[in-house]
Amino acid sequence: MPRRAIENHLLQLALAPAVAVAVALAAYFLALRYGDIDAALASGALAARQRQMLAVALLAMLAALALAAAVAWRLTRRLAAPARKLEAALAAIRDGDYDVRLPGDGAFAALEAGVNDLAAALAATQRQAARQLAERQEELVRQLGFAQAMLDAQAHAGVGLAIIEYGRIVFANAAVERMSGYALPELQAMSHFVQIAHPDDREHIMRNHFKGLAGQGCEDRYDFVLLRQDGSVRNIQWAQTPIAADHGTQVLGILVDITEHKRAEAQLAETHRQLLWRKEEAERANFAKSRFLVAASHDLRQPLHALMLFAAEFETTAATPDQKRLAGQIGAATGAMGELLDALLEVSRLDTQDLAPQRQALALGPLLEGVVAAQRQSAEAKGLRIACVGTQAWTDSDPHLLRRLLGNLVANAVRYTHQGGVVVGVRREGAGLRIEVWDTGIGIDSGQLPLVFQEFYQVANRERDAGKGLGLGLAIVERLARMLGHALHAHSRPRRGSVFGISVPRVAAVMAPHEPETAAAPQTARILVAGAVASELESLGNLIGNWGYRVLRAGDEHRLRAHMAAMPDLVVCDDSLIAGLAQAIAGRPRPRPQVVLVGDPPDNQPPGNLFLDGRLSKPVKPGRLRALLHHLLEEANERADAKAPGEKPPTP
């Protein structure tokens, strides 16, 4: 039924009683009026007439009321049933029954259709909400399962979880129970969670706990000692974070048992301490050994030096073949002994850091030529070619130590090369230089290359033949390179050869003031031999004299100064008189004689500004001494011959 029709029915229902009352009142007033008119006719009939009119009015009123009641009853019949159905449907919807439907054909058809639409919409909304709720519940179940799996995994892995509220433990997983030895009810019954900690740590734990609750800065991760129920202790790492709760703030604590880790750390620290102690003991023992060898070097060198001189003198004076053979065997034996002793003492001295590099600018050309010249005789005896590529480069290094380093490299190359040759040269390397020694020797496998710098390691000398070297040359090279701060390089291919390089800085050339020199021919030169040991002085003088030189001998500083006044061409001085020689040379005008030092001076440094043209360690090898004397005197002659008459010295 449309809204207008409903409104009309309700209006009729409301107006029916009013109309009946109005009709009755109208009849009554008409009766009164007519009664006034008839009053003039007869006053006796007035009362009867009034009663008659009143009765008519009452009857009219009753008829109107009956009509209104009939109309109301009819309207009630038409509206009551749909209203009751509508009320029942709304009650069902209110109770959650969204499947109820009204016929939609009564007096409230439009309203019933609206109620049906509302019920359908609510039913669809309920289904959608139920579906979403089911999905959320399923996701929540999965998340709860994942969280439970994580909690179980942490518990199995020994990670304890505890929730603390107002200082009491309200929850703890199985890992906490295992750590503490308490069951969960026992933990919950504690008055404060700090009871599980060792008394020494409780104050620190409480202070951090209250600071964390107050939002102040506190340690959220620290270690403490847990006191178990049985009285034993465990080392625990504790991490805490506040979490919001309905009735306050709770603290989530994570406990990790680090007892084994602490024990391992302690064992590792103890092992490290023992290793350090043993290392220090080994270093002290090695240092003491090296110090002993260095301290005993003079006593060991002196008799061997004398023996080598005696053997060399015996070899030059031997008359019969048997004597020459015996002299050669003695010389070979003493030479091998001297080489071993010299290498051992040099390694010991490098280990004790007795040598302090004296760096200076030096020309590499003459230094490399001198190194190659010292090995030329050995190379030619094996049929090898040995060459030095000329260079004008200068570097900053210790000339004596660098010469020893390169000498060992070249000697090693000659020793392990059986055909081909050895080449020494310099190439640029960025802003620096690289000195390289190339050979065509036996080569070294890549796996053995890092080992060749160790003491006594030899690639092709398992039988320990002294004629193949001692295995100390490259060890000395490595120590010298480290001492000088020069990088060492090595490349090799088996049966193809090797190349060893040393990186050095590159500096500008330094021009030295020209010194006029005089030199005598090698076989006519006067050589002053100075030494405090009479037997060594006699043997060394006889040896040099047998080579054809004119020999002067000085056994003390007085005779040394006297012979220096005669201006010898070259001085071979023992380390015992090197200080006196420095004083004698400092007091004489130029030109000065060339100086070869035999032995090691105090502190391993020549006194004053004494310049050494050559240096030989004890015991002196006669062949090396002879080659050095010849080289120095020949070089002096070449410089003297090349000097033009009237030539002015170059300015520095």
Image (cartoon, rainbow, N blue to C red):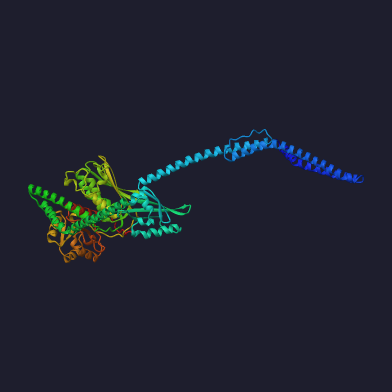
Tell whether 323 sits left or right of 344.
Answer: left
Compared to residue 483, the image places residue 556 above or below, namely below
Please tell me which residue lies in front, 202 or 620: 202
**Position of residue 301 measured from the top left corner of the image (x, y, whole percent):** 16, 57
Please tell me which residue lies in front, 629 or 120: 120
Outermost residue toward the right in this view: 41
Please tell me which residue lies in front, 106 or 26: 26
Please tell me which residue lies in front, 347 or 229: 229
Name which quarter of the figure residue 302 lies in.
Answer: bottom left
**Position of residue 477 measured from the top left corner of the image (x, y, whole percent):** 25, 51
- Residue located at (48% from left, 41% from top): 137
Q: Is residue 195 visible?
A: yes
Q: Is residue 364 visible?
A: no
| Image quarter of the C terminus | bottom left
**Position of residue 247 measured from the top left corner of the image (x, y, whole percent):** 48, 54
Name which quarter of the figure residue 41 lies in.
Answer: top right
How many numbered marks, from 0 up? Answer: 0
| Image quarter of the N terminus | top right
- Residue located at (37% from left, 57% from top): 194
Tell whether 187 sits left or right of 49.
Answer: left
**Position of residue 82 measured from the top left corner of the image (x, y, whole percent):** 66, 36
